[in-house]
Amino acid sequence: MPRVLVTGGAGFLGSHLCESLLEDGYEVIAMDNQISGQAENLEPIFYHDNFTYYEHDVTNFIHSTGDLDWVLHLASLASPVFYQENPIKTLKVGALGTHKTLGLAKEKNAKYLFTSTSEVYGDPEVNPQPESYRGNVDPYGPRSCYDESKRYGEALVRAYRDKHDIDVRIARLFNTYGPRMRLDDGRVIPTFMRQALQGEPLTVHGEGKQTRSFCYVSDLIDGLRALMKAEVQSPVNIGNPDEWSIRELAELIIDVTDSSSEIVYEERPKQDPQVRKPDITKAKRHLNWTPTITLREGLQELPEYYKRRMQD
């Protein structure tokens, strides 16, 4: 039975990954400090015989008894709401947390996966963004605590690979959505969903012409699992290349929720990226992976989930 440690295991992505691994016969140890993760995300698996959960901050020393086959470092404050409220913690997770988890992988002779982000490309001047693109990032900007935490994390993973011969994977994750994404996450899909379901105006920044590419969570998890099975040790984009403007997204969510909400326009945040679209040629070639769920199909899974969450 393969044995894995998942940091950020109570988070949106982490909980789905833990569930997927358990279904495939893994023994899973999850860690989370619950700044943005929620233990309730683990309710479907909490009492599984092969699952263990610890409340722990990965910026502190990590001790794990027994062997490990994988260390999967998903811990991160990925939402702008959370990372802008906790900029120092965000940088520590990318730096100290990555260092601690790499040290554990070295000690256990385990393989290692680091979830990076499309934010390493910043406000890109190339669209779509291939892994070879070096990005357009402001290291002293309003988003820098998150962008630079991931850029540094990638560099640290590379250094451990070269110095200690650790078998590593780096996933550059693009916008992902689905059940267990918090209503107060601050990112566009849960925000629009909440507004639409409550009959409030949907707040679009600027003219809404900026674009994003949205990947449903089950497709994203399949991509991570495919990356674990592949042999590629350089960064790989994981995301859905179907590009939508934010205004188009707002209109689609109003349609999916059958809402009477209107669209209103507000000032755009500083350095809000104009475009975001993954080039997934590398994932197709090396992982034999491509997303299959359309944006409409994925969004249709959310209204009932968020209605329940708003009643809690």
Image (cartoon, grey):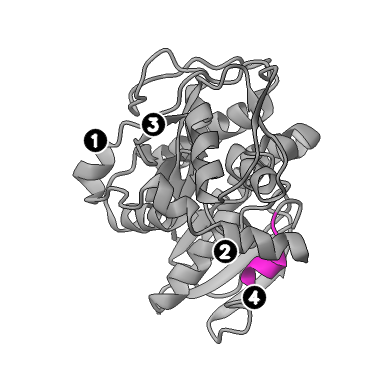
CB under 8 Å between callouts 3 and 2?
Answer: no
Identified by mark 2, the residue type is Ser
Quadrant of the frame with the C terminus: bottom right
Q: Circle 2 is placed at which residue position?
A: 15
User: Which residue, as the protein is rendered here, is positioned at the far bottom?
Assistant: 49
Question: Could you tell me if residue 166 is visible in this image?
Answer: no
Q: In the rendering, at what x and y percent does residue 93 appear?
A: 67, 43
The answer for how far apart the CA atoms under marks 3 and 4 are is 33 Å
Question: Which of the two marks, 3 or 4, is nearer to us in this view?
Answer: 3
Q: Circle 4 is placed at which residue position?
A: 43
Label located before the other in sequence (1 or 2):
2
The answer to whether 65 is drawn above or below residue 151 in the figure is below
The answer for how far apart the CA atoms under marks 3 and 2 are is 26 Å
Q: SS class of the residue under badge 1?
A: helix
Identified by mark 1, the residue type is Thr
Name the foreground residue: 249 vs 59.
249
Q: Circle 3 is placed at which residue position?
A: 243
Q: In the rendering, at what x and y percent does residue 253 appear?
A: 53, 43
The answer for how far apart the CA atoms under marks 2 and 4 are is 9 Å
Label located before the other in sequence (4 or 1):
4
Label located before the other in sequence (3 or 2):
2
Name the foreground residue: 176 vs 193.
193
Q: SS class of the residue under badge 2?
A: helix
Q: Which residue is pictured at 56% across the width and 30% down the height?
A: 152
Q: Circle 1 is placed at which residue position?
A: 281
Near mark 2 (Cα within 10 A), the count class, few <14, some 14-19 or many ≥20, is many
Label located before the other in sequence (1 or 3):
3
Near mark 4 (Cα within 10 A), the count class, few <14, some 14-19 or many ≥20, is few
Near mark 3 (Cα within 10 A), the count class, few <14, some 14-19 or many ≥20, is some
The answer for how far apart the CA atoms under marks 1 and 2 are is 27 Å
Near mark 1 (Cα within 10 A), the count class, few <14, some 14-19 or many ≥20, is some
Question: Could you tell me if residue 297 is visible in this image?
Answer: yes
